[in-house]
Image (cartoon, coloured by chain):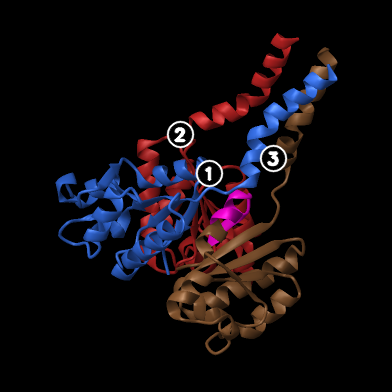
Chain colours: A brown, B blue, C red
C-alpha cells in the first residue's frame, strides 16, 4: 500500500516537477503603438530570439493604433513579417475588433498575418497557457 | 486497489484538467498614463469586451500619472467610469499610495472608483489568481 | 484505505491550497524607456514597496532604450541603483543582447547592476516562476 501511495503521489506531481524545471521560450508580444520605432523594435527582438533560441515560440498580438504595422500599404516591416511568418519564426495576429472599427478588410493585411477575433482575449489565453507576456512600449 | 488509485489520480487532476480547457475572460488593466487618449482607449476596450463577452471580469488599476482619470475634476471619462462600475461591467481601483503622494482625498474621486492600498500589489495579486494582464500604453 | 486515500489527496493538494492563500510580493519590472521620468518612476515605486513590504522581492529588467539608466555615465539614478542593490531591496539586470548591440561593456555599468544574457527570457522565466509582471511605461 505504502509503495502504491508513493507511486500515485509521484505520478500526480510529475507535471508540476517538470514545469518547475525548465521555462519554455514562449512569448506573446502585445503591441498597440503606431510608432514605427516600436514596430522595428519587435522585429529586432524576434530576430534576436529566434537566432539564439530556434525552439522559441513567438507571437505578436497587433491591435489598436498598431494595426498599421500589419497593413500592406502602411507597414514599414512588411517584408520582415512575411519572412518571419513563412519561416515559422513568429506568428502575427491582427485584431478583428480593431479592423472592424477602422474599417479594414483582411485583403489589406500583409500575407502571413492571421486574424483573431479579439487580441486581448488572444493575449489572456496565451498567458493562461503559461506563455510569457511582453508589452512593447516606451 | 487499482480502481481506487485511478479515482484518486482523477480527483486530484480534475482542477488542472478543467483549468486547461477554458480560459476565463478576466483582465486586469494597468494604466499609468496621463494621456487622455489612453483613458479613452481603456474605456473603448472595456465596452467592446463587455458587449461581446458579458461574462467578462474586468478591472482597471489606476496609479501614477493616470490618477487624473479617476478624479471628478480632471477625468474626461467620468461618466463612463460611473456607468460601467454601477452596471458591474468593470471595477476601477485607484492607488492609495499615489493618492497620498499627490495629496488627493477619496472625496475627489469619481463615484464608483474604489481605493486599493497599492495598485502594484493589486495587479500582482490578480495575476497570481490567474487573471490576464494588459498594460495600457503606446 | 479510505483514510490513506484522503491523506494522499491532501498531501498532493497542499501546495495548491497554500498558493491560493497568499500572494507573495514578487515583481519583475520591465523597462525599455529612455525617458528619465520612467527611470525615476521605477525607483520611486521600489522605494515605496520596500518600505511598506520589506519582504518584497523586486527585480528590474533593463533593456532596449532603457540601458542608459544602468550606465555610470548616463544614468540619473545611479546612486539609487547602487543603494537599493547593496541593501538587497531590489536587483537590477541589464540585458547582454542590448549591451552587445550598443557596444557597451560591463565596466560601463553602475556597480550593483548584474548582466543577464537576454532580458526577455529573464522576464519570461520570472513570470513562469509566479512573479508578478509590471511594464513601466506611459
Percent coordinates x, y for residue B49 in the rendering: 43, 59
For label 1, the residue is B130
Q: Mark 2 — residue?
A: C55
Q: Is residue A73 left or right of residue A21?
A: left
Q: Which stretch is magenta? A: A124-134
Residue position marked by numbered label 3 in the rendering:
A20
Q: What element carries label 1?
A: loop
Q: Position of residue B19 (x, y in %)?
A: 61, 41
**Marks 3 and 2, Cα distance to the nearest angstrom?**
23 Å
| Element class at badge 3 | helix
SS at badge 2 = loop
Have a look at marks 3 and 1 and say if they share a chain.
no
Determine if residue C75 is in view: yes
Q: Residue at x 46, y 63 (%)?
A: C69
Protein chain holding label 2: C
In the image, taking residue B27 as reference, residue B14 lies left or right, namely right
Query: C66 or A36: nearer the eye?
Result: A36
Q: Where is residue C109 in the image (x, y as percent from the top left)?
A: 53, 61
The residues tagged by marks 2 and 1 sit, at their Cα atoms, a distance apart of 22 Å
Is-magenta flag for residue A125? Answer: yes
Q: Is residue A17 above or below residue B38?
A: above
Amino acid at each position: 500500500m505504502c509503495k502504491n501511495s508513493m507511486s500515485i503521489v509521484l505520478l500526480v506531481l510529475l507535471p508540476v516537477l517538470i514545469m518547475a524545471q525548465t521555462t519554455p521560450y514562449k512569448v506573446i508580444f502585445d503591441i498597440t503603438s503606431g510608432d514605427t520605432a516600436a514596430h522595428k523594435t519587435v522585429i529586432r527582438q524576434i530576430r534576436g530570439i529566434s537566432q539564439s533560441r530556434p525552439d522559441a515560440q513567438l507571437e505578436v498580438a497587433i491591435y489598436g493604433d498598431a494595426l498599421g504595422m500589419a497593413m500592406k500599404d502602411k507597414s514599414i516591416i512588411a517584408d520582415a513579417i512575411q519572412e518571419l511568418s513563412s519561416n515559422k519564426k513568429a506568428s502575427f495576429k491582427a485584431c478583428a475588433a480593431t479592423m472592424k472599427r477602422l474599417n479594414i478588410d483582411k485583403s489589406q493585411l500583409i500575407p502571413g498575418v492571421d486574424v483573431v477575433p479579439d487580441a486581448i482575449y488572444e493575449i489572456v489565453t496565451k498567458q493562461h497557457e503559461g506563455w510569457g507576456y511582453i508589452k512593447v512600449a516606451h
